[in-house]
Amino acid sequence: MSQLLLELFSEEIPARMQPGAARDLERMATERLKAAGLTWDALTTFAGPRRLTLVIEGLPTATPDRAEEIKGPRANAPEQALEGFLRKTGLTRDQLTERDGVLFAVINEAGRPTPAVIAETVEAIVRAFPWPKSMRWADATLRWVRPLKRIVCLFDGAVVPFVIDDGAPPPTQDEVLRGIASGDTTEGHRFMGTGRPLKVRDFADYRKQLEANHVILDVADRKLKILEGARAACHARGLELVDDDGLLHEVAGLAEWPTPILGDMDPQFLDLPPEVVRLSMKVHQKYFAVRDPATGKLAPNFLVVANVEASDGGVALAAGNSRVLSARLNDARFFWDEDLKTGFDAWNAKLQGVTFHAKLGTLAERVDRIAALAREIAPLVGANPDEAERAARLAKADLASGMVGEFPELQGVMGGYYARAFGQSAAVADAIRDHYKPQGPADTVPTAPLTVAVALADKLDTLVGFFAIDEKPTGSKDPFALRRAALGVIRLVLENASRFPFLAMAKFAGAIVRLNAISRSTHLAAEQMVAVRQHLSLDVIEQSKVPLPIDRDELQKQIDTANAEARASSGDLLAFFADRLKVLLRDQGKRHDLVDAVFALGDDDLVRIVRRVEALDAFLATDDGANLLAGYKRASNILKAEAKKGDIPTGMVQTGLPNQPEAETTLAFAADAARTAVDTALDTEDFAVAMTALARLRAPVDAFFTDVMVNSDVAEERDNRLKLLGQVRDVMGRVADFGLVAG
């Protein structure tokens, strides 16, 4: 078994593309080599600032011989069918084998040397590599992320010879076609290496020579070097590094020999919001922030990761980076000072000219919708309606501020700072700051009632708005991040245990969206538009002194239609939430079919739904639950079969009939007792007790199906037993639709 070493060496590869490139190289090599019939023991890829590397251990020296039998047409098939089959296989008629009147082609293919397969594989990978962005250079037609310089390709220590034509025309007709030839030489660090090509023999030698020439191949090793050096530099000054995994990953892709250097910044900039300082460092300069462990606040320092080891220990580098950072922070200070001169009223006025979506109006109209919705939601989550509306009306204002224009990542955060600066309460400021949360599965969930109200209103308006204009997620496409918004609503409700009437709020939000569209299309006056957006009646609208620009009956018809559409679309939105809830619970180890079984009851209280699912999951994990589910399905199948013949008998189940089996009587009393116990438990939302009540049905149901024939020849007996099975199904259906439970 042999080793393959492949290196694709180019100019600098953007850090953000390196992880995907390593995965794509692994995938493409795996697919092509497996298709050729090769197997191996281990395959590893590496990505860095200037090179993609692949090493495969345990490759055979040749592909195995292959024999393939292909079934063809019948021997008496039309001539055209036979000719097509012969073209497909490349054989002649006398080379085919006939069995039972059918023609077969037997193709024997000898194995190929592995180097030949590798050469074809590497060229196919280079030509089809899926870079997010690629380029051509000079007069070549070959595309790569940056100009491709060298290819190292060694199999069992020997060069796999090939040339990848770069498409550039030769200088004269007498010269051979130019291209990139494979070889056994690579390069070290651009500045700290020897400057000479490095001839390598295998992967161990390759890695050793690179490290000797200041190139760390593995990104994990580069990250470790950064963290160890950064923490040591901070510790020496009594400081602490502010961890940032995203930035760490990025700088590890920028330097082949990362060297952390601690620098000083002007302390006067620390009176800016810390998020501004950190973001200026991170976004513009790729610096890590540093804190004082005694206070937990930012220190007047930064940590930069250089790609060289400076002879002066990085003093000059630190000073130069400090000057650049000061210039950036001066820009941030300008935006901060100018914003404090402006204020929320001016920013909200600007939002009237910013389109949120062509079919959903301006950002100012969206703010009106969120404010109305937040006011409705506030009492449901324990917040003050007036404060919720005030916070919602200020929540989007910072989008028009200078600071957020420069740093979009600070939307909401800066609004919270400005709210405090302009005298708003701490609760309102926090609601503005955190209303975008949670923005992903790893983000924290707000718990302050006022923040929860505004966050729910913001996300719910987004969802109902885009559903109203039929911009729903399809497949993997979700351009408006509606799945993330739905998951945010679910987490806000569940983690705060909020008893949130989802359907009612979705209908209300949907009506506001549609009425908002009516106000735009009918050109209502400003005060009339506010009235429509707030879902007020026409009588209130007509109290304004401005006459309606549209016939009153026509406007009423449009409003009624909008409300009807909102009611209809809320069901689609609830189904969408059910899918998102299944994803969330599946990640927690819950079964998705149980979510369907509970949602089928029409409940829209997410807290109650999850409690039902958890209780149902625990119940079905028991023997009683599993056996009762089997009994339910048997009863349901009998009732479905009878329903196809005609109506299923309904009414009271009779006991004490002549010759009535004891198992039938026992089940009748057990079902009646279970219904009472289940209803009582559901009223108090004690779902564990409800499941316990159902568990008591297990033995009577088993005995019934063992001792009783449902389809009796006596019509009265048959009808009574069908009624009894219907009663059992109905009792269980009060807890969940067991017909949707797998098993």
Image (tube, rainbow, N blue to C red):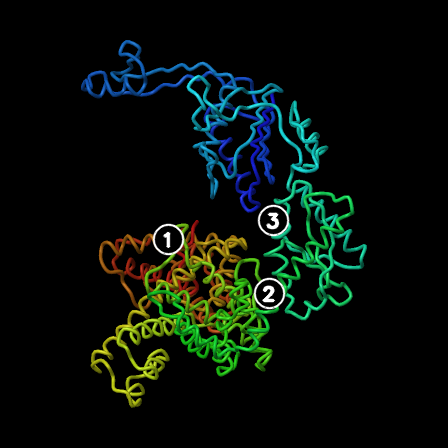
Residue 624 visible (yes or no): no
Location of residue 154 in the rendering, given as x and y in whole percent from the top left corner: 59, 23
Compare residues 239 and 454 and report the one nearer the observer: 239
Residue 715 visible (yes or no): yes
| Residue to which mark 1 is pinned | 474
Compare residues 221 and 743 and report the one nearer the observer: 221
Q: Secondary structure at mark 2?
A: helix
Which residue is pictured at 32% across the width and 62% down the height?
723
| Residue to which mark 2 is pinned | 331
Compare residues 195 and 274 and report the one nearer the observer: 195
Q: Which disc, if any, is residue 86? A: none
Residue 518 appears left or right of 184: left
Upstream in the sequence, badge 3 or badge 1? 3
Location of residue 30 in the rendering, given as x and y in whole percent from the top left corner: 51, 31
Q: Quadrant of residue 406?
A: bottom right
Q: Quadrant of the N terminus?
A: top right
Location of residue 237 in the rendering, given as x and y in whole percent from the top left corner: 80, 57
